[in-house]
Image (cartoon, rainbow, N blue to C red):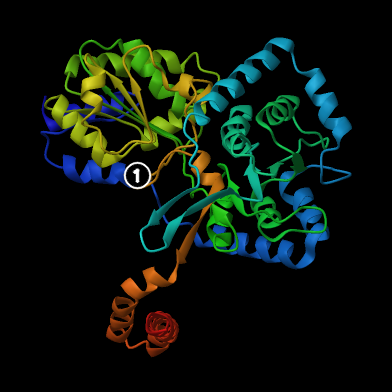
Amino acid sequence: MRASQSKASAKAGVVRILRTDEAGFEAAFAKLCQRREAGAQDVEKAVRRILERVRGGGDAELLACIKKYDGAKIDALEVTRAEWDQGVDSVDPADRAALGKAAMRVREFHRKRIPSSWEVREEGGGVFGHRVRPMHRVGIYVPGGKAVYPSSVIMNAVPASVVEVPEIVMATPAQPDGSVRADVLMAARVAGVHRVFKMGGAHAVAALAYGTESVPRVDKIVGPGNVYVATAKRFVFGEVAIDSEAGPTEVLVVADKSATPAWVAADLLSQAEHDEMACAVLVTPNRALATRVQEQLAKQLRALDREDIARASLAAHGAIVVARDLAECIDLANRYAPEHLVLAVEGSETLSKQVQNAGAIFLGHYTPVAVGDYLAGPNHVLPTGGTARFFSPLGVEDFLKRTSVVRFEPPKLRELGTDVMRLAALEGLGGHAASVDLRLQKIRRARREREAAREAEVEM
């Protein structure tokens, strides 16, 4: 197939087809990998204004922002216990059971390995270690835009609950009538959330970061959101900690001839339907599979409720890449560093050992991303935009802080003090050296006094 034929095929289909042996592939793939764009200046200016409004005006400005941006009429910022109970009671029992099962499985997964305090004792009186403590208060942001995500409540709050963060605060936009969706409240209940506030967008991030008369200031904000939320989180970092600047969802599927085209297409659409900015990419060494997946995408799109969103996503940010072999497929996957990596291949576990960069890996033909999104156990809050090269999934570690502990007894300081002073001298920091030298002088004096006392006893 020549480049002109490939372009014609891509134009006819719902997603473009690229071939690694075509001229211009490297430039096209590099552009495909560039998912993290700098925030638009108008968005950044708007977010800064909102942050300053809430920081300076407290509840009054927060309520004004909720009315303007959330389009909700609320009587109070915080969900009352009665509202919460009523919402939980209204959830269908089968849905309640499914949410409970999801929370249970996620909780069991995160309990497997919780970091603990530790210390090492050395001869001579040296003690070193870490004391691990949960953060005092964390904020969970739950979006309420194009879709509603009770699963995000569970994934964000459960790890904090597992390590017993004393106060887990959730922010989510209210509906126009001022209520919070019952399934979101149910998810908050089973996930261990303590308080829920009716607020969304950059103003919710501001309230959590700075605090208001009604909203407590938190130590860390986690959870996905739109470009305004992501930008606000970036701007408040330093006032509070954040998990990461989450971008649109993404999936990269590596598939060989053993893959079922309809299933691969469904996996791509399962992420494309989230948002017009979502990224869905197939990489395969099999040209016939590429063609059949293209056909399946066209067919399944027609039956998808969120067809317009998924179609826009595939057209703007999707691709089918035909590679030379599976080794090249994995090389491309590592360069792309996807949030979700599906290995729809024979010997998927063996192949997965070659993966260096991915938020989560889904092995084999019977492991769609959807099982990880809801109740497999591992967290679905994953690094996006290529940040899987250096970020990890959300976990219990994100809600813990470590404090170093150091203790030197006189013998240990006598052993190492001279080297400390020498290193301080190298850096021209005489005060550092003096702080050690004064102590060493006392240690030497005490030693001389003990020696003199022993000699006196011998002479008597």
Q: Position of residue 1 (x, y in %)?
A: 11, 24
Q: Quadrant of residue 391?
A: top left
Q: Which residue sits at x=50%, y=34%?
A: 275
User: How many numbered marks, from 0 up?
Assistant: 1
The quarter of the picture where the C terminus appears is bottom left
Amino acid at the residue labelled 1: Gly
- In the shown orientation, is residue 457 left or right of residue 189? left
- Dot 1 surroundings within 10 Å: few (below 14), some, or many (20 or more)? many
Q: Position of residue 371 (x, y in %)?
A: 47, 19
- In the shown orientation, is residue 173 left or right of residue 225? right
Is residue 210 shown above or below 194? Answer: below
Q: Position of residue 166 (x, y in %)?
A: 69, 44
Residues 113 and 196: in front is 113
Residues 240 and 433: in front is 433
Label 1 sits on residue? 386
Element at label 1: loop
